[in-house]
Amino acid sequence: MRFFKRENKTQELMDEHVEIVSKATDHCMDAFFSYLEGKKKKFEAATLAVIQSETRADEVRKETQLLLYGGTYLPIFREDLLELLELIDNVADDAEKAIDFLRIEHPEIPPSWHGDLRIIVEKTHQSFVFFKEAFSTLRKERSITLSYTHKVQEAEKDVDRLQDALMAKIFQSELGLAHKMQLRDLILVIGYVSDSSENASDKVGLMAIKGRV
């Protein structure tokens, strides 16, 4: 009975971890939009919320790891859960990195590209929303898990396509090379969130196929 209680606690913590990382991506999107709109106080508030969410995600990740290392689940399941936990945590790390780029470098983004950048940020955020759906079906409706992991993959492909299109516009512009490179780096760092969401999604898909929970 004690084993099953510990197992349930692990599941609760993993669910909490996903929710916290989800909040980090929400706040990340809010921060970007506030930055583009020149709303300094809202940007600062959203930035702080991302940092706090990332810190809390780390705390929950470590607590979950301790339970897993302590013997919850059979070893064959434990390895998958530990790997998935790290992959999910990477999303929060990448959300914080994206915000740090804005906070530290303060890139000047020409208004003509605000719309393109907003779409990239929205699509990146959507990739984790789809991952969250995939994760939620893993223990309950595994038969539809892969449909959501496919949506994550498509969202990530869309982000790649949108990034390439915007970078082409930037490098065809009259901006100075240093400015172009900075905007390129900004676009790339935004995409890390969707890359990490896809990595976590791929793991969930593999676990669904294996039938491991």
Image: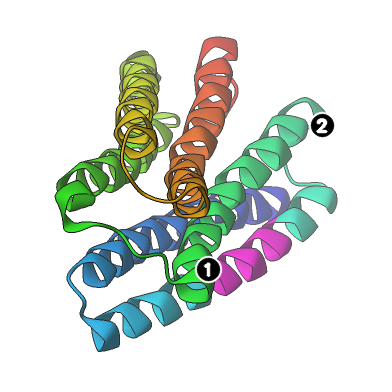
Of the image marks 1 and 2, the number of the one nearer the N terminus: 2
The answer to whether residue 126 is left or right of residue 198 is left
Q: Residues within 10 Å of mark 2 (few under 14, many from 20)?
A: few
Residue at image position (59%, 73%) is: 55
Q: Amino acid at mark 1?
A: Asp
Q: Quadrant of residue 153?
A: top left
Q: Amino acid at mark 2?
A: Pro
Q: Mark 1 highlights which residue?
A: 100
Q: Residue 176 got which mark?
A: none
Per the image, label 1 sits on a secondary structure element best described as helix
Residue 116 place in picture, x, y as percent: 21, 42
Q: Quadrant of residue 107?
A: bottom left
Q: Main secondary structure of the magenta part?
A: helix
User: Looking at the image, can residue 53 be seen?
Assistant: no
Figure check: 79 above or below 145: below
Residue 147 place in picture, x, y as percent: 31, 16
Q: Are marks 1 and 2 in contact (CB under 8 Å)?
A: no
The range drawn in magenta is 54-64
Total label count? 2
Q: Is residue 183 magenta?
A: no
Residue 1 place in picture, x, y as percent: 67, 51
Along the viewing direction, whichever of 72 and 170 lies nearer the viewer: 170
Per the image, label 2 sits on a secondary structure element best described as helix
